[in-house]
Image (cartoon, helix red, strand yellow):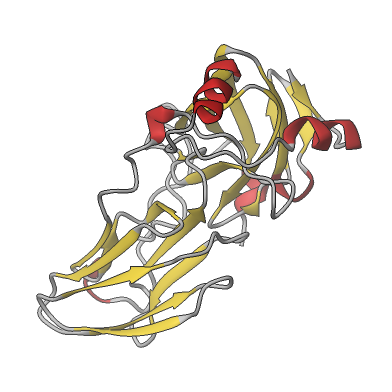
Amino acid sequence: MLASTIGSVVIALFCAAPLDVAGSGERTKAAVQEQQWGHIRGRFVWKGDVIPQLRVLQHAPNGIPDESLIVHPENRGIANVFVFLERERADCLPQIHPFHRNQTKEPVALTIKRGQFKPHVAVVRAGQELRLKNLDKFGYIIHVAAFSNPARNLLLHSGRSQSVILANSEKRTVQVTGTIHPWVSAWLVVADHPYVSVTDENGRFAIFFCPAGVRRFRVWHERAGWIQSVELQNVPTELKKGQMLIDLQTGANQLGDIQADSKLFER
């Protein structure tokens, strides 16, 4: 069930004591076993008469495509929508299922090739290595526009890589871009928990082993910003600042197609 308002009861339900399931204590193991877990799936779909075509970036060389809006030409799925669980308080961490324990060991890679970052969007856990690599024949100055972490300017030579550690989670998305070559651009969500997803080329997202209960998720897209309204099961639903409350049941939760009006993405 999707709630359309935010109340104090919802916040009280969300805010459990901080828990690190990677610990070996019996209390931690018992709490994990007692906690109920849910999986959530859904798909963001373009609602509009005309499906936008992939454009070429203006003032960029070699016909670099504009990846700020990608809609599947057949099934209308919207790619690169971030969906992530929001913490209610700074001192209130959600419980972490052991399924997610080893996800931060490998670095997240952003690779420049032919004037573009690949991938265009990525999810980074706080403290996880972000590895920037340049496969082009010339160098770039890359700006990491963080807020809760120090913003950085990095000189990335041809054929070289540099690593960045974003130790703190970010309340807002972080842009990584070329200072002289602004078409070299990517977006990050930096979270201190694993309950984050980004839609694929078909608009689908999935989040696994999330603590069951009424949870507040946020929804963001590069072109739309915080997505303010959708149609869920053909019911218009307002999302204040991209906030979507979901009564997450134990086991599988299917949201189905979430329709986002084309007007949200105009600029």
Question: From the viewer's perspective, is 66 left or right of 162?
Answer: right
Residue, far front: 26
Question: From the viewer's perspective, is 205 left or right of 118?
Answer: right
Instruction: From the viewer's side, name the closer residue of 264 and 218.
Output: 218
Residue at 44% over, 42% down: 79
Question: From the viewer's perspective, is 211 left or right of 246?
Answer: left
Instruction: From the viewer's side, name the closer residue of 177 and 108.
Output: 108
Residue 208, percent across and down? 47, 26
| Image quadrant occupied by the N terminus | top right
Residue at 39% over, 37% down: 200
Does residue 85 appear in the picture of this structure?
A: yes
- Dividing the picture into quarters, in which one does residue 211 lie? top right
- Image height of 53 relative to 38, above or below: below
Residue 2, percent across and down? 74, 23
- Image height of 46 relative to 253, above or below: below
Residue at 73% over, 34% down: 14
Residue 135, percent across and down? 13, 70
Does residue 64 appear in the picture of this structure?
A: no
